[in-house]
Image (spheres, grey):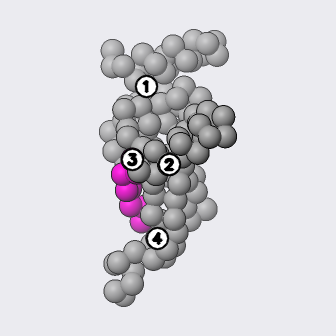
Amino acid sequence: MLNHERIFENFLKTKSLKLTKPRKIILEEVFKNHGHFNVDILFDQIRNKHDNVSRATIYRTMPLLVGSGLIKQSLRCQAKDHYEHIHGHPSHLHLICVKCGRIIEVPSKEIETILLDVAQEKDFTIKEFNIGAKGICKRCRKK
C-alpha cells in the first residue's frame, strides 16, 4: 500500500468511512497529476479507464482528500476550483493567465522565508499558504 493511500484510508476511518474502489481510483488519478487539476479534468481522465466513477462521486471525494491533508484547493481559475497534491510537494506560488487559464508554478523559498519571519514576529503559526498573481502569459500576449 502506498503512503498516500494509507494516509487517506486512516483519515476515512476517523470519519467511519471506507476506502471504496471508486475512492481508490480517484486517489490514484489525483497522484498521477503532477500539476493543477479540477474535477472536470479528473473526471475526463478517470472515465477513459473506469466508467463506474461518476462526477458526483469525484465532487464528494474532493473534500475528503482535502480534509486528509493530501491535497489542497489551491486556486479558483475560470470559475472552477483547482487542486494540487501537497503531500511531498514543495511550496510555490502561482502565476495565472486571465485569458487562457494557464497556471505557472514558481518555486518560492524566499517568499516562504519572508512569510515565516513575519508570522514569527506576529506570534502566528502558518499551516499553509497560497499566493497567486493574475496577469497575461507570454503566449496570450503574442496573439
**Residue type for callout 3:** Lys
| Quadrant of the rendered image containing residue 127 | top right
Quarter of the picture holding the C terminus: bottom left
Mark 4 to mark 1: distance in Å? 32 Å
Quarter of the picture holding the N terminus: top left
Residue drawn where x is 38% and y is 40% of the image: 90
Q: Which residue is mark 3?
A: 109
Magenta span? 101-109
Q: Secondary structure at mark 2?
A: helix
Single out the residue that lies furthest toward the bottom.
Answer: 143
Q: Is residue 80 above or below residue 86?
A: below
Residue 120: percent from left, percent from top: 59, 37
Which label lies toward us, 2 or 4?
A: 2
Q: Is residue 115 above or below residue 52?
A: below
Mark 3 to mark 1: distance in Å? 33 Å
Q: Is residue 129 above or below residue 57?
A: below
